[in-house]
Amino acid sequence: MKTKIQLLLALLFPILLFAQDVSLQSFATGFSNPVDIKHANDSRLFIVEQDGVIKIVNTAGVTNLIPFLDIDARVRSTGNEQGLLGLAFDPNYTTNNRFYVNYINNSGNTVIARFTTSANPNIVDDTSEEILLTVTQPYTNHNGGSLAFGTDGYLYIALGDGGSGGDPDNYAQNLQSYLGKILRIDVSGATGYTVPATNPFVGNTAGLDEIWSYGLRNPWKISFDSNNGELWIGDVGQNNKEEINNVPITNSGYNFGWRCYEGNSTFNTSSCPAMSTITFPVSEYNYGGNPFRCSITGGYRYRGSMYPDLQGLYFFADYCTNEVGTLTQNGSSWTMTMNGPFSGNISTFGEDMNKELYAAGLSNGTIYKVIDTTLGIEENSLANNYQIYPNPTNDFFQINNQNTTSQIKEITIYSFSGKLVSTTSIIADNQKIMTSQLSKGIYIIQIISNNDTNTYHKLMKN
């Protein structure tokens, strides 16, 4: 992220005021500078605060009183882009209880560390820290900070070019520096880490073994597409272009071009490799303009099931305008759409265990649910052979199941913002699900069948 530009946006709940499909709705509040959202393959959301604290939010949007992790004393967050910046849970977290963080220490340098959850899964013993890697930072900005596990089981670490402006020391193209790179390491051992043999510079003195790709300015948020394993990168530009990169991880050694190129535009091509060796972004947008766009926040490709019309869209945001952008794939190209503006200076996106998306407002401390205001799901029609009646409802509703091969086993009711309201096990056909306790409004009904197939429907409560 660039230096904060405090934009006073008056609209806190744009879902009611904008004619658009993609919107944000408040899910949880009261956070201090949230910069990352992750899950541990269970119902909890973990919210990373820049000062050095990680908090747990449940499905009802309620935050645990005691933090999951508090390492505030070890974290320097005085610089605008410093702090506790990234979190990733081990793919085998349910058995090994290990997770990883990326933070700036009191010396101003990047630390990649591993912690192990104790007997209490909601509170971490901070003495369990094992520091895996420390990277010297020459300036206070462009620290990157994202951590993510690929489908190959390796940990990917996104680091910025070290800061200042224009990468004055050309770190991003220097293969003897970790800065401006994405590193890839194997953390499956009992302690420390090893380097995957397939990293591009293993056995080659031209580059450091941990480097997986290079040529990045400030990769502010990376993610993996849970469908195809591809990596998405939102790379913050200098003063011309904000860029989005998308590559398969079956290859490596990508050079994303900085400081030779900013997006698709020439920046400083002195001593640069041939243009044909550069991996250019799949999409970009201009820095500046009206509204004033300044800094991309990378996100995720939507792979949830609650909003079918959003399926396959890549979500990102601009920190200054508070717009949420989407990329829609059209063959080999991508179409960009900007939605909003919203509120809070959007600093990160995150998935829950069901692959539904969330976003965080840095300046207002709000966690939002990404929603489709049209829902794209059925109300009381016979879609998927289920009919909800009466809909709208007052005191109860029932479901007529026309599918003899797939019986309903559970009905879950969510608020329109995605908060869990109730769960009912179905033990009889046409069983009544009580709604007299609900407030008036729109709800989302999740129907779970005995083969674990999920469908979603709108319910109106009078």
Image (cartoon, rainbow, N blue to C red):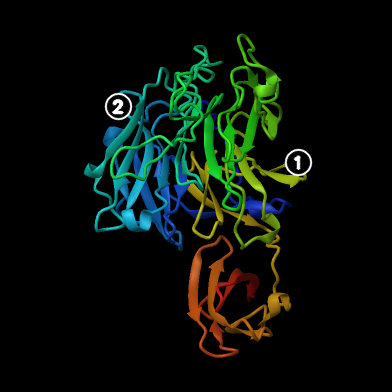
The image position of residue 435, as x and y in percent, is 55, 80
Q: Determine which residue is flagged by label 1.
A: 332
Q: Position of residue 93 (x, y in %)?
A: 37, 54
In the shown orientation, is residue 313 left or right of residue 148?
Answer: right
In this rendered view, identify the residue nearer to me: 395 or 50: 50
Task: Tell me: 289 left or right of 109.
Answer: right
Which amino acid is tagged 1?
Ser
The reply to whether residue 297 is visible in this rendering is no
Residue 142 to residue 431: above or below? above
Q: Quadrant of residue 247?
A: top right
The circle drawn on residue 60 is: none
Which of pointers 2 and 1 lies earlier in the amino acid sequence? Answer: 2
Is residue 266 or residue 367 the one in the foreground?
266
328 in relation to 103, above or below: below
On the rendered image, what quadrant is the C terminus found in?
bottom right
Q: Give the x, y percent position of residue 126.
A: 25, 44
At numbered mark 2, what does the secondary structure look like: helix, strand or loop?
loop
Residue 393 placement, left or right of 103: right
Give 114 or 176, whichever is nearer the viewer.
Answer: 176
Give amino acid for label 2: Asn
3D distance between C-alphas at marks 2 and 1: 45 Å
> In this rendering, is residue 164 above or below 85?
above
Q: Which of marks 2 and 1 is in front?
A: 1
Q: What element carries label 1?
A: loop
Q: Quadrant of residue 436?
A: bottom right
Residue located farthest toward the right when viewing the structure as drawn: 331
Picture residue at 44% right of the left edge, 37% below the top: 196
Q: x, y percentage for residue 262?
A: 64, 22
Q: Which residue lies furthest to the left in this view?
A: 127
Q: Residues within 10 Å of mark 1 (few under 14, many from 20)?
A: few
Question: Which residue was labeled with disc 2?
Answer: 106
Q: In percent of the image, x 51 and y 88: which residue is there?
A: 427
